[in-house]
Amino acid sequence: MDKKTFTDSSVIAYMNANYYAVKFDAESQTPVEYNKFTFKYKPEYKAHELAIKLLDGSMSYPSFVVLNEKEQRMAIIKGYQEKDVFLETIKTLATTK
C-alpha cells in the first residue's frame, strides 16, 4: 500500500484534509507513551501492546485503525486496500459521526 495506495494524490489530499495519519509498526520494540500509559513490545505475541489494544488482539497485516476526535475507535480496516476502495472507505468514515 505504501507504493500504490498511499502515493495516490487523491488519497494523500483527502487524508491530509480529514485525518491525522500515523504510521505505526506493530512489531516495533520501542516503548510508546500514550494517554499516560507506556505500551511495550510483547514477545509472546510478537507484537506491540498498542497494536494489540487498538486491534483487539486480532493481528492482521496491514491493518488500519480509524479513531474519531474523541480517540474512540470507529473502524478497523484489515488487509490490502486498492486506492479507490480505501479512499471510499475513509470518505464514508469521515462523514460518520
Image (cartoon, helix red, strand yellow):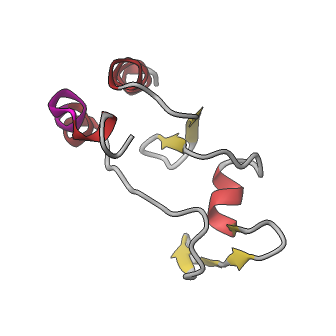
Residue 21 in percent (x, y) is at 34, 50
Q: Is residue 34 magenta?
A: no
Q: Is residue 11 magenta?
A: yes
Question: Total of numbered circles in the picture?
Answer: 0
Q: Foreground: 38 or 61? A: 61
User: Which corner quadrant of the image does residue 6 belong to?
Assistant: top left
Q: Compared with residue 71, is residue 7 higher up or lower down, i.e. above or below?
A: above
User: Which corner quadrant of the image does residue 41 belong to?
Assistant: bottom right
Left or right of 16 in this view: 97: right
Q: Foreground: 45 or 32? A: 45
Our reading of the magenta stretch's main secondary structure is helix
Left or right of 40 in this view: 72: left
Left or right of 72 in this view: 19: left
Residue 88 in percent (x, y) is at 37, 17
Q: Residue furthest front?
A: 3
Residue drawn at 66 percent across, 69 percent down: 48
Q: Compared with residue 11, is residue 46 higher up or lower down, i.e. above or below?
A: below
Residue 26 in percent (x, y) is at 59, 62
| Magenta highlight range | 8-13
Residue drawn at 39 percent across, 40 percent down: 1
Residue drawn at 19 percent across, 37 percent down: 17
Residue 46 in percent (x, y) is at 74, 68
Residue drawn at 33 percent across, 18 percent down: 84
